[in-house]
Image (spheres, grey):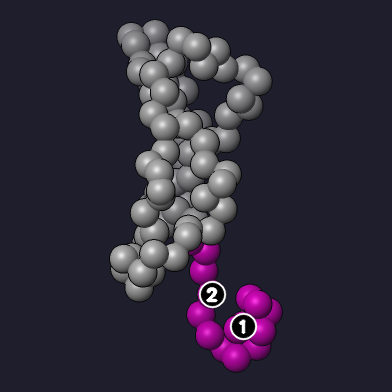
Amino acid sequence: LAVSLGGLKLPLSRLKTGTPPRLDARTIDFDRLEGQPSAFPPEPFSFVRAGRGEPVAQQGRLITCHRTATNRRTHEIVRDHAHLLPRYEGPGPRYCP
């Protein structure tokens, strides 16, 4: 796509993402966390579909989210490694895919 747009002499640049890291569920003790189950039936994101009684895609694949918290040690680790975090500077909006 970028090659085609560049061929039309359109300006190209990259967007920045703040997507959180993915975690390996096998390394988490979920019994120590507060479960937050998905709403059922799930509400669609689109107002176009809301209230029409249409099922939400993949509603049979809902999972329970889990809440956790940080502590002083967590904050210390983040501060000690903040220089490794990506910077969101420059032109354009920041987005999350």
Q: Is residue 90 above or below residue 81?
A: below
Q: Is residue 32 above or below residue 91?
A: above
Residue 63 in the image: x percent, y percent?
52, 36
Residue positioned most to the bottom: 8
Q: Is residue 37 left or right of residue 63?
A: left
Q: Main secondary structure of the magenta part?
A: loop
Q: Secondary structure at mark 2?
A: loop
Q: CA distance from mark 2 to mark 1?
A: 7 Å
Instruction: Name the residue that disc number 2 marks.
Output: 12
Q: Position of residue 85 (x, y in %)?
A: 47, 35
Secondary structure of the residue carrying numbered label 1:
helix
Is any part of residue 12 visible from this angle? Answer: yes
Circle 1: residue type: Gly
Name the quadrant of the N terminus. Answer: bottom right
Query: Total marks drawn?
Result: 2
Q: Quadrant of residue 52?
A: bottom left
Image height check: is 59 above or below 74?
Answer: below
Residue picked out by circle 1: 6
- Which residue is painted at 37% across and 60% down in the image? 45
Q: Residue at x 41, y 23 (%)?
A: 35
Q: Which residues are magenta?
A: 1-15
Residue that lies at the very extreme toward the front in this rendered image: 53
Residue type indicated by callout 2: Leu
For disc 1, the neighbor class at 10 Å (few under 14, some 14 to 19, many from 20) is: few
CB atoms of marks 2 and 1 within 8 Å: yes
Residue at 51% x, 69% y: name it.
13
Q: Position of residue 28 (x, y in %)?
A: 57, 17
Q: Nearer the viewer, residue 23 or 42?
A: 42
Q: Is residue 92 visible?
A: no
